[in-house]
Image: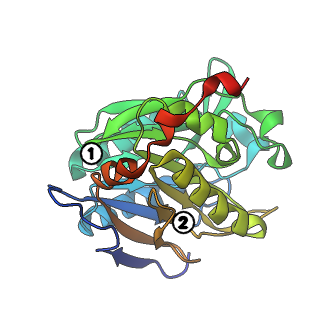
Amino acid sequence: MGVFCFWLVTGLIKVVEGSTRMVKVAMIQIDVEYGNPAQNFAQVTARLQEAKALGAQVAVLPEMWNTAYDLTHLATLADPAGQQTQRVVSQLAKQLALNVVAGSVAIKKNGRYYNTTYIFNDQGALVQTYDKAHRFGPMAEDQYLAAGHQVATYDLAGIRSASFICYDLRFPEWWRTAGRAGVDLYYLPAQWPASRIDQWEALVKARAIENQAFVVAVNRVGDDPDNHFNGHSLAVAPSGTVLATGGEQAGITIVEIDPTAIVAAKALFDIQADRRPDLYQ
């Protein structure tokens, strides 16, 4: 697994006068073990404990962290109805008093397989789920996984939030749908290959700018049989400023987010208010 590192990034978001608190978010980059849920659950348990020890209030995991993209063995690897994920992460969230955006996991429900995010508050309650809507053909998702159909918005750590997954990043219309619900912070777990990492960084910045919102995007590191992943998790402000990056190694990066920065951004101009949906047909 190599060396696991920690970074603390503070003071990078301007505190607007009258701000009462910052929210500390942990971006957790891990080397997901291909087709090994037992090892991955043990790894995630340790990383969430470490994130709490670093002072995190919200912890974010990468995409498909239970199985990686071992899609040909989903019959034996996928989490039935997400029961193990919900049980383990809910208990950890409650024990640690930690909000958890639990990346995404491969699950089986109603006879089909899904790439699903679970979100837990710091009391261990499941506050929202999201099934990945856009399936990535080059990694065979369209052959093995069913698509989700609903945007997922929720309140977490006092911030109106939404979750998407990896390839969803390339569909700004989908993000705008959540933006109309007043979302201030988007979470994006991913398994984004190193060969397209420049696009990853550009698109994350674009989604933050065009939605006047924070984006916390968490990618994995390591290798599977078909791809190399080099992290580059990043947190981006509504201005497009990169607040923190996770580098290319497994590790935890803590970034402090000031919710009142959204108010300051929209005081200049409010993109949502100026939209003209009648033109976008």
Judged from this view, the residue extending furthest toward the bottom is 3
Q: Is residue 40 above or below residue 1?
A: above
Describe the element under mark 2 as helix, strand or loop: loop
Taking depth in this image into account, of 104 and 265 the one nearest to the observer is: 265
Quadrant of image for the N terminus:
bottom right
Residue type at tag 1:
Ala
Q: For mark 1, what is the residue?
A: 157
How dense is the environment of label 2, judged by Cα within 10 Å: few (below 14), some, or many (20 and up)? many
Q: Is residue 260 above or below residue 161?
A: below
Q: Sequence order check: which comes first, mark 2 or mark 1?
A: 1
Taking depth in this image into account, of 187 and 120 the one nearest to the observer is: 187
Q: For mark 2, what is the residue?
A: 233
Which residue occupies 61% across, 55% down? 206
Taking depth in this image into account, of 103 and 41 the one nearest to the observer is: 103
**Horizontal side of residue 230 vs 25, given as left or right:** right
Judged from this view, the residue extending furthest toward the top is 110
**Residue 86 location, x and y as percent?**
41, 36
- What is the quadrant of residue 254 in the picture? bottom left
**Residue 260 location, x and y as percent?**
27, 52
**Horizontal side of residue 14 vs 112, given as left or right:** left
Which residue occupies 71% across, 36% down? 134
Q: Which mark is residue 92?
A: none
Residue type at tag 2:
Ser
Which residue occupies 82% across, 61% down? 226
For the question of whether residue 279 can be seen, the reply is yes
Describe the element under mark 1 as helix, strand or loop: loop
For the question of whether residue 132 can be seen, the reply is no
**Horizontal side of residue 94 vs 127, given as left or right:** left
Count of marks, rendered view = 2
**Residue 24 location, x and y as percent?**
29, 61
Quadrant of image for the C terminus:
top right
Distance between the Cα atoms at labels 2 and 1? 21 Å
